[in-house]
Image (cartoon, rainbow, N blue to C red):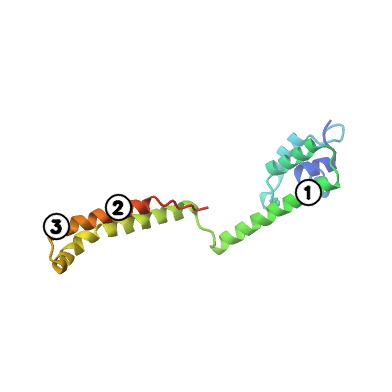
Amino acid sequence: MGLSRRAYARHRGVAESAVRKAIAAGRITLEPDGTIDPVKADREWDLQTDPVKRRSSPVPRAARKAVDDTLAEAGPVGPAAFMRARAAREMIGAQTAKVKLAKLKGELVDRAKATALVFDLARRERDAWMNWPPRVAADMAAELGVDPHLMEQVLEHHLRRHLAELAEIEIELG
């Protein structure tokens, strides 16, 4: 024995009228006893429904099934359980819409790209500092009246120590 029209509509996440229209249009077939085999009907629905006319649900079928399973495990489904499930669905839909809108506005940043850019910037900054002692050591040595080679070695030693300390700082892109 399969599902009633109303139960199949709940299973499918559509209105009961949509199930009636699908039966009338021949997109899904009834079992001999007048019920609906959900596996067979899902397959028929997906194959025979025009993709342009499909409405995408804000909550994927797997998520709806998980909510249904959770509510079934919780015991008899009452108005409170239904309202909690519906509120959860609406919140997920709102969050999904918010993310899509932010993406369309260009407000979201690709995490991998951002991480790569920060890494590249830090590497260039480090390289610029590493090239600094050889460029300025001779001028500084002349001003102080010391050996230019010794000045470059001292600058490089302290710079490497400082860069090593900076390298220990962890950045969290949370």
Which class describes the residues within 10 Å of circle 3: few (<14), some (14-19), or many (20+)? few
Residue 100 picture location, percent across and down: 61, 57
- For residue 149, the mark is 3
Tag 3: amino acid: His
Mark 1–mark 3 distance (CA, rounded to whole Å):
74 Å
- For residue 84, the mark is 1
- Quarter of the image holding residue 75? top right
Q: Is residue 15 in view from this perspective?
A: no
Which class describes the residues within 10 Å of circle 2: few (<14), some (14-19), or many (20+)? few
Sequence-first tag of 3 and 2? 3
Tag 1: amino acid: Arg
Q: Which residue is mark 2?
A: 161
Tag 2: amino acid: Arg
Sequence-first tag of 1 and 3? 1
Left or right: 61, with 171 as reference point: right
Of labels 1 and 2, the one closer to you: 2
Which residue occupies the foreground of this view, 61 or 52? 61
Mark 3–mark 2 distance (CA, rounded to whole Å):
19 Å
Which residue occupies the foreground of this view, 120 or 25? 120
Vertical placement of 105 versus 93: above or below?
A: below
Secondary structure category for the residue under label 1: helix
Vertical placement of 76 versus 99: above or below?
A: above
Residue 101 picture location, percent across and down: 61, 61
Q: Residue at x 19, y 59 (%)?
A: 134
Mark 1–mark 2 distance (CA, rounded to whole Å):
57 Å
Secondary structure category for the residue under label 3: helix
Q: Residue at x 82, y 33 (%)?
A: 2
The image quadrant where one finds the N terminus is top right
Residue 130 picture location, percent across and down: 26, 56
